[in-house]
């Protein structure tokens, strides 16, 4: 048996990585040239790398390690479950205790009559499930043509063929023959980049009404569902103007369109409530969950559906499922994670302590010469970098050039803060204390100042025409 220890020199690990490991969302040839950073362990909000650096992870991994790294209780829960029952399926008239317990817990936590869970291994799988769920729902109700799903440009719903079709990422649609048929995209409520001369409230309404226009154009009897993230995450932490969600809810109600809230990032406390839908005041028929469900300690996702959908789907054989639907080890880990979230009152901590403290500091970043708007909901925030705040100008350089320079400075200062185009984003673990946030901001300020100096030196502080 071959093992790879953490004691190998970094260069050797990098060479082995380059030889055989294909990275997601990366130009692998470039990675091989530059050498990747090797993460070896983590505790709390800090990662350690193979060079012994301590890195403050203001992204909670990939928006998921909500309770922070290194919680032994989750490791113990996994080990216990592996010894007891490492695997069994839930297909053929069987079930097991972790799946039963987790489904019950989720029904208790989820709002209204969202009482039924179909498990998946990830957010992508769960959204694939949702495509088949909503189409089957309408077919069972005698409306098989009500099968179009409306989504938004710049949405992220996953990377499988189905979920990437729901997503609105142009770069993803350019590869591999997607979107699948009968998915339609409307514009996103991104006021900073696309609001033009409209006031944010006016723009929010206009963008919501694109849903109504699409329904009328496609036909009410053709549109099955609308899917959206309560706050767009991977698209750059885009927070809709306040007028947006009430109007979306009105339209979904009026035309009997199923509303799918993709809570993969927003769920489990990130926005300061258990679910982003509660923060935004919407009443979805289906919620997609993953990531924070297990704080990323085990791969698990799912769809939480309401009583009506469960009843309609339950009256037919739903020919769908994954080997790892409700995987007992992942379910046991998720249950333990939810226990910790509840018992340590972490959602309250976000709402009452961490988020208000973070918001004040985050919004003050607009006084930095590089920063235009600062948006934040709970523990997910973004800043738009701009060469001219008053006109909300874009940079003359190719989109993402400035964001990348800024991210590189963050990386050099041992801070994980990401860029999406020329927006910088954070999504720290929910357990951060005010002292952690102070430390984060020392690094943020240093990185922004260095990026500004670098951009100015390179003559890039110029607006596009
Ligand atoms: N929905 C949303 C809202 C997501 O953010 C998925 C679904 C898919 O989940 P899985 O578990 O299949 O990855 C996601 C995932 C990024 C990034 O660069 C974001 C995600 C995944 C990978 C990269 O911000 N979000």
Image: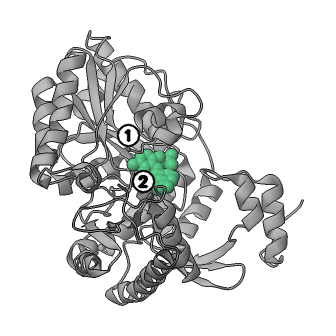
Percent of width and height locating residue 199: 11, 54
Where is the N terminus found, in terms of image quarters?
Answer: bottom right
Find residue 100 and report its horizontal and vertical position in percent.
Answer: 42, 45
**Of residues 395 and 248, the one drawn nearer to the viewer in this rendering:** 395
SS label for mark 1:
strand
Please indicate, yes or no, whether residue 70 appears anywhere in the rendered image: no
Q: Which mark is residue 77?
A: none
Q: Is residue 20 left or right of residue 244?
A: right
Residue 137 lies left or right of residue 5; in this view the side is: left
Label at residue 303: 1
Q: Which residue is mark 2?
A: 234
Q: Is mark 2 within 8 Å of ligand 1?
A: yes
Compare residues 257 and 17 and report the one nearer the observer: 17
**In the rendered image of this protein, does residue 242 appear above or below residue 156?**
below
Task: Describe the element under mark 2 as helix, strand or loop.
Answer: loop
Earlier along the polypeptide chain: callout 2 or callout 1?
2
Residue 101 vs residue 188, the one in the foreground: 188
Image point 42% across, 42% down: which residue?
Answer: 157
Q: CA distance from mark 2 to mark 1?
A: 20 Å
| Residue at image location 53% in from the left, 53% down from the top | 330
Q: Residue furthest right?
A: 1
Assess disc 2: are there few (<14), some (14-19) or many (≥20) residues with their C-alpha within 10 Å of its C-alpha.
many
Q: Is 383 drawn above or below residue 291 in the view shown?
A: below
Q: Quadrant of the C terminus?
A: bottom left
Quadrant in the picture for residue 351: bottom left
Residue 437: % across, % down: 36, 84
Is any part of residue 76 visible from this angle?
yes
Q: Nearer the viewer, residue 415 or 408?
A: 408
């Amino acid at each position: 048996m071959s093992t790879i220890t953490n004691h190998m020199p970094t260069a050797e690990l990098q060479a082995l990585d380059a030889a055989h490991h294909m990275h997601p969302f990366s130009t692998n040839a470039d990675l091989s040239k530059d050498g990747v950073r090797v993460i070896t362990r983590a505790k709390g909000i800090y990662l350690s790398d193979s060079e012994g650096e301590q890195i403050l992870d203001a992204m909670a991994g990939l928006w998921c390690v909500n309770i922070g790294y290194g919680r032994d209780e989750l490791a113990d829960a996994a080990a216990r479950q592996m010894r007891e029952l490492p695997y069994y399926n839930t297909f053929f008239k069987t079930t097991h205790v972790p799946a039963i317990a987790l489904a019950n817990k989720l029904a208790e936590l989820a709002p209204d009559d969202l009482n039924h869970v179909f498990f998946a291994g990830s957010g992508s799988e769960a959204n694939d499930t949702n495509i088949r769920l909503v189409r089957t729902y309408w077919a069972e109700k005698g409306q098989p043509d009500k099968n179009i799903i409306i989504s938004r440009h710049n949405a992220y719903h996953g990377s499988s063929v189905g979920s990437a079709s729901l997503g609105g990422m142009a770069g993803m649609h350019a590869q591999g023959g997607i979107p699948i048929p009968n998915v339609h995209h409307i514009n996103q409520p991104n006021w900073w980049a696309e609001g033009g001369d409209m006031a944010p409230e006016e723009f929010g309404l206009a963008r919501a009404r694109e849903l109504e226009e699409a329904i009328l154009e496609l036909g009410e009897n053709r549109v099955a569902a609308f899917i959206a993230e309560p706050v767009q995450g991977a698209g750059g932490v885009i927070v809709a103007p306040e007028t947006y969600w009430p109007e979306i809810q009105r339209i979904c109600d009026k035309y009997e369109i199923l509303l799918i809230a993709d809570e993969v990032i927003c769920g489990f406390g990130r926005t300061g409530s258990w679910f982003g839908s509660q923060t935004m005041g919407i009443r979805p028929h289906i919620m997609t969950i993953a990531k924070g469900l297990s704080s990323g300690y085990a791969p698990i996702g799912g769809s939480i559906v309401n009583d009506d959908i469960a009843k309609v789907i339950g009256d037919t054989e739903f020919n769908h499922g994954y080997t790892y639907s409700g995987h007992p080890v992942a379910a046991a880990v998720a249950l333990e994670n939810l226990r910790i979230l509840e018992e340590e009152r972490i959602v309250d901590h976000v709402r009452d302590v961490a988020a208000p403290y973070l918001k004040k500091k985050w919004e003050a970043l607009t006084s930095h010469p590089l920063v235009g708007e600062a948006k934040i909901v709970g523990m997910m925030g973004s800043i738009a970098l701009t060469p001219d705040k008053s006109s909300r100008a874009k940079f003359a350089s190719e989109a993402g050039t400035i964001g990348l320079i800024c991210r590189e400075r963050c990386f050099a200062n041992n801070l994980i803060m990401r860029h999406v185009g020329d927006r910088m984003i954070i999504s720290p673990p929910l357990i951060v204390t005010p002292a952690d946030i102070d430390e984060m901001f020392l690094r943020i300020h240093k990185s922004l100042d260095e990026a500004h100096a670098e951009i100015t030196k390179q003559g890039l502080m110029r607006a596009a025409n």
